[in-house]
Amino acid sequence: MNLMTELSPALSTIDQHHIDRRRYPHGVAFMDGQYLPMSEAKISVLDWGFLHSDATYDTVHVWDGRFFRLDLHLDRFLAGVERLRMKLPYDREKIASILKQCVALSGHKSAYVEMICTRGSSPTFSRDPRQAENRFIAFAVPYGSVANKEQLERGLHVAISETVRIPPNSVDPAIKNYHWLDLVKGLFDAYDKGAETALILDTNGHVAEGPGFNVFLVKGGSLRTPAFGVLPGITRRTVFDLCAEIGLAVTAADISRDDIKTADEVFITSTAGGIMPVTRIDDTTITKGQVGSITRRLMDLYWQKHADPAWSTAIIYP
Ligand code: PLP
């Protein structure tokens, strides 16, 4: 009898295979030089990425068989890797081709694609991060959105949590990271209040961001998004680009709780869902509970850009 069956006598390899197939989304991962089904992409529990959140990552999406703004995601990822003093085993072109291959092999025409670099672990279990062998992982799974179809039509109900986002002088939010305990606490606070998602605060008590998204308000025809203590989101950047195209004023500056509750329109932005309307914050109704006209216009334009070769890259499927 081997150790595995002694520890879990009822779980045969075949049962395990079925459980894994149900538990994992359909998709393809790349790690240690190989493409694998999602259920087989596993890392050591000794990886510092797991033990200490010592990792950076980026998420890009594929829509209708095309990456959206892949170059911007690669720029942000590579800058984060460098700032964390990690080394990737592949250059930018190779990473782009690995991401394309994960999507092509998965067959997904709409996908959520992640690239990750973890500190890895040291062959001698040294506690010195310089000795660790950094690890690159990528995967493509079906596209997912912060807001579901119904929420996109009626607008999200968001609660503002008292939780403060980890300060930028502790963890630089420009390095996309997995330090999510503050964001997850915010989510539980929001659920306790009957809301659907959360916004949390920066160290000065202003509105910062939410679990996986930035936030914008519209007031008197101009847009504003927090400047401090937030991830410079690619969708946030895309809103700036779209506003420039259609002549709307947009700035990055502090947003107080009062500012956001008295805004004409509010929306959140993420690679997972794009531009998503908010129509209720705590007990305050925004835009009379309707999706605002500027939000709607930006949402339409955002999705139109997914077919534009200046903003997107086609994937060649086998
Ligand atoms: N803020 C945080 C904390 C995030 O994790 C994310 C995305 O995952 C965002 C904002 C939105 O960034 P992007 O538009 O690049 O997806």
Image: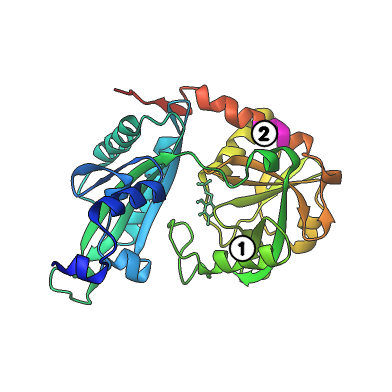
Q: Look at the image and give the residue range highlighted in magenta.
A: 295-299
Expressed as whole percent of the image width and height from the top left, the position of residue 312 reads 45, 28
Of 110 and 3, the residue lying toward us = 3
Q: Which residue is mark 2?
A: 298
State which mark lies toward you, 2 or 1.
1
Q: Which residue is mark 1?
A: 187
**Residue 250 position by quadrant:** top right
User: Which residue is rendered at x = 33% and y = 23% of the image?
Assistant: 316
**Residue 273 position by quadrant:** top right
User: Which residue is rendered at x = 61% and y = 63% of the image?
Assistant: 187
Of 116 and 36, the residue lying toward us = 36
User: Which residue is rendered at x = 68% and y = 70% of the image?
Assistant: 205
In the rendered view, tell whether residue 87 sits above or below residue 98: below
Whether residue 283 sits left or right of residue 195 in the image: it is: right
Whether residue 274 sits left or right of residue 221 in the image: it is: left
**Residue 42 position by quadrant:** bottom left
Of 295 and 189, the residue lying toward us = 189
Residue 64 among those drawn in magenta:
no
Q: Is residue 36 visible?
A: yes
Expressed as whole percent of the image width and height from the top left, the position of residue 240 reads 61, 40
Count of numbered tags: 2
